Image (tube, rainbow, N blue to C red):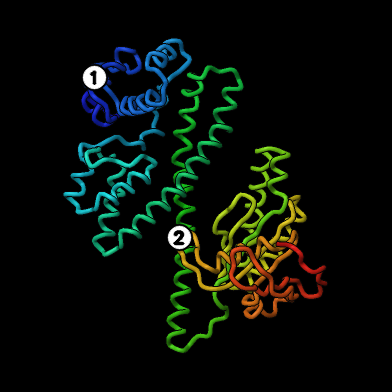
Amino acid sequence: MDECSRDEVASKAGVEPGYVDGLVVLGILKPGGEADFSSGDVRKTRWIRSLERAGIPLDGMAAAIREGALSFSFLEVSAFDRFSGLTATTFQQVTRETGIPFEILSVVREAFGHSEPSPQDHVREDELSVIEAVEFQLSKGFRPIVIERWLRVYADSLRRVAETETDWYGSEVMAPLLETGMPEGEVLDSQAALGSDLAPLSERALLAIYHGQQEQSWTKAFVENVEEALDRAGLYTPLHGPPAVSFLDLTGYTRLTEEQGDEAAADLAERLRSLVRQTSREHEGESVKFLGDGVMFYFRKPSQSVLAALDMVERAATQSLPPARVGIHVGPVIFQEGDYFGRTVNLAARIAEYSRPGEVLVSREVVELVSGDDLTFSEIGPVALKGVAGAVHLYRALREGRSDGTPNVGG
């Protein structure tokens, strides 16, 4: 445990030295001497300051500590060493020394989950690593807007990881300890050692999965680059057309969750995620985003999007999920921040809204590109879709040998 002086604790925690003195007087911090503070005391000071700003009085916390109802000693364990303090450098100084625009530095702070800084605010120690990467990217000509998107995608994805970890740690570690009747202060101390053992394992798992996802993404980009190079040289004929976008909705989801409650909704959403992720991977597609009662997908091969949709609809019926319906369209899309945009996406969503439970509807453009794979298409006819100019020719996708149902009257 690194030793710190009173002034170092104050600087790294972002408070005045007098605030540290006040915590010592209250018995919240218990240093052995003027220079006998620890990095744990820095964390305690930061967290206590946050609690105070949230409306929890200092004297109340001090009384709870004296009575054994509350403890901050868990902040001394190694699991918390990763949480850094403030440096002596301001954002204004970083801008002056590196040339990084303050607007990008604000997004760096935002990526860490904090509010927008002022130029005079001090940079956190952990932010320096990100700033170094940003400085390198700018030196190589990366556009600021691309860097900001990169930072926000990291932030959004890792926030979900952190929140999920915190949730299951609470349910699997904290709650069982509390159920034994153990006081809150003892619970916080008891779980600290387990957290320190688990943290490095979780970090290695996170990095391993990230590298696996990198391999998948880089391989995909490599294949596309090779295809394009061969195509330009007249040595390659693509086996598939433009990409397909599809939307799957569960009908009756809202009514079901209103009747059965939030826990049932969460269980339903998890079962849907498991089903569609497995099925989309089997057909070389990806689930782009989850929308409560539905999912958006991207497929490079339109035929695979239809096969995946039929599989999902059939599997939903066998896994106690509400009836599923799917809409598919093909065409150019715009990729940005891990998501796809454009007319193709909008039309696919409208087709899904028009389809009936248990039905896979596709546009004429899909039918023109898909053949074989034991698929047939039954024409529904030109239909008017909400928010779409002109009639859209829709077809119901079926497996070979399956009979069509009654005419569609949805919308």
Q: Amino acid at mark 2?
A: Gln
**How far across and down, in percent of the image, does residue 116 sit?**
33, 42
Q: Position of residue 7 (x, y in %)?
A: 21, 25
Residue in front for this viewpoint, 3 or 231: 231
Give me the residue at 23% from left, 30% from top. Answer: 11
Q: Residue furthest bottom?
A: 234
Above or below 1: residue 149: below
Q: Is residue 341 above or below residue 97?
A: below
Residue type beneath disc 1: Gly
Is residue 86 found left or right of 362 in the rendered image?
Answer: left
Q: Classify mark 1: helix, strand or loop.
A: helix
The residue beneath circle 1 is 18
Residue placed under numbered mark 2 in the picture = 214
- Label 2 to label 1, Cα distance in Å? 48 Å
Dot 1, how many residues are within 10 Å of its Cα: few (below 14), some (14-19), or many (20+)? few
Count neighbours of disc 2 (C-alpha within 10 A) and say few if under 14, some if 14 to 19, many if 20 or more.
few
Q: Tell whether label 1 touches label 2 (CB within 8 Å).
A: no
- At 35% from the left and 25% from the top, the residue drawn is 49
Q: The N terminus is located in which quarter?
A: top left
